[in-house]
Amino acid sequence: MAAQITMNTPMRYARMLGVGAYRPDRVIPNSEIVDAIDSSDEWIQSRSGVKQRYRARPDESVVDMSEVASRDALAMAGLDASQIDAVIVATVTHMYQTPGAAPLLAARLGLTCAAFDVSAACAGYAYAVSVANDMVRAGTADHVLVVGMEKLLDITDLTDRGSAFIFGDGGGAAIIGPSDVPGIGPTVWGSDGTKSELITQAPSWTDFGANRDLPWPTLRMEGPAVFRWAVYEMAKVCQQALDATGITADELDVFIPHQANIRIIDSMVKQLKLPESVYVARDIVETANTSAGSIPLATERLLRERPDLHGTLALQMGFGAGLVYAAQVVVLP
């Protein structure tokens, strides 16, 4: 009979111990971009809710920004970087096919631990939180650093009327560690690759490399189709995440959806029948859509502005290119 693998670590619980964020110094109001897209501040706000966005410096990388957010998250968690066992960076704007951003970030923190990137667009942070939760629960790691960080304006066509106003730079980080009680509920996640053409990069890096006369690769989005998909499908995913955790809308304290569009957020609030007592993150007004960075950015802001929300129950969910989505209920640090 073959020998059996011995598991010495029993399953345990995990929770979020700290969060941090990074917002670049430069603020770009709508007034700076409207002429290039023949639009107006009023039109942009009515369509998306966005008033401004942050833009990273040309010499700032995803790794640079991630380091700042990570150190803030470590400080809130009361941990030293040496206590981190794994680093996961969710991003689609680290401009190297290899090496990934996570090993470079780990090195910045003086670590030689496991480190890898997650490419799941705007759901990347929620995906990474789920992976980190599983790692801690299984004993693969005691503390995992999760980062959602983007430099989206590097791949945004600022002359495209349908998308130029939507995106911004920045993101955040979270520390996931062991807990005596459940702190992260089951993740409801999935994808629909049949709709992948709704949010894409064009041209591909291969085509651009073969023909430098092509425009620099940028994001292309079928806005109305994405809007319809999100409005009709993502509230269902949120409800499934609540059901999987055994939490009702009345018991929820905070809702932190991906900051894609203020009208999508408001629609989900209505469909979920969230009471007015639930704090709803609408960080999009000041930071625009930062893809994998939007949920941790919004989380850091709400805990800074509303310290009474520390330790409360939050539903977070992300969705985007792929099309991919993920939602889970978490206890905030």
Image (tube, rainbow, N blue to C red):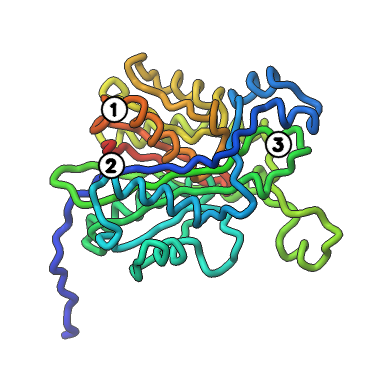
Work out whether residue 3 can be spotted: yes
Residue 198, image x and y in percent? 66, 43
Pointer 1 local density, CA inside 10 Å: few below 14, some 14–19, many at least 20: few
Going by the image, does 228 lie left or right of 297?
right
Q: Tell me whether the residue at label 3 lies in contact with that at label 2, contact meaning CB atoms closer than 8 angstroms.
A: no
Q: What amino acid does circle 2 point to?
A: Gly
Whichever of callouts 1 and 2 sits on the residue coming sooner in the sequence is: 2
On the image, numbered disc 2 is attached to which residue? Answer: 185
Using the image, determine if residue 217 lies above or below residue 246: below
Q: CA distance from mark 1 to mark 2?
A: 22 Å
Going by the image, does 131 lie left or right of 227?
left
The total number of labels drawn is: 3
Mark 2 element type: loop
Q: Tell me whether the residue at label 1 lies in contact with that at label 2, contact meaning CB atoms closer than 8 angstroms.
A: no
Q: Quadrant of residue 199?
A: top right
Please give the name of the residue rendered at 15% of the width and 64% of the height, measured from the top-left corner: 9
On the image, numbered disc 1 is attached to which residue? Answer: 307
Please give the name of the residue rendered at 24% of the width and 52% of the height, measured from the top-left corner: 79
Tell me the quadrant of the picture where the N terminus can be found.
bottom left
Q: Tell me whether the residue at label 1 lies in contact with that at label 3, contact meaning CB atoms closer than 8 angstroms.
A: no
Using the image, determine if residue 259 lies above or below residue 97: above
Q: What amino acid does circle 3 point to?
A: Ala
Residue 232, image x and y in percent? 53, 29
Q: What amino acid does circle 1 point to?
A: Pro
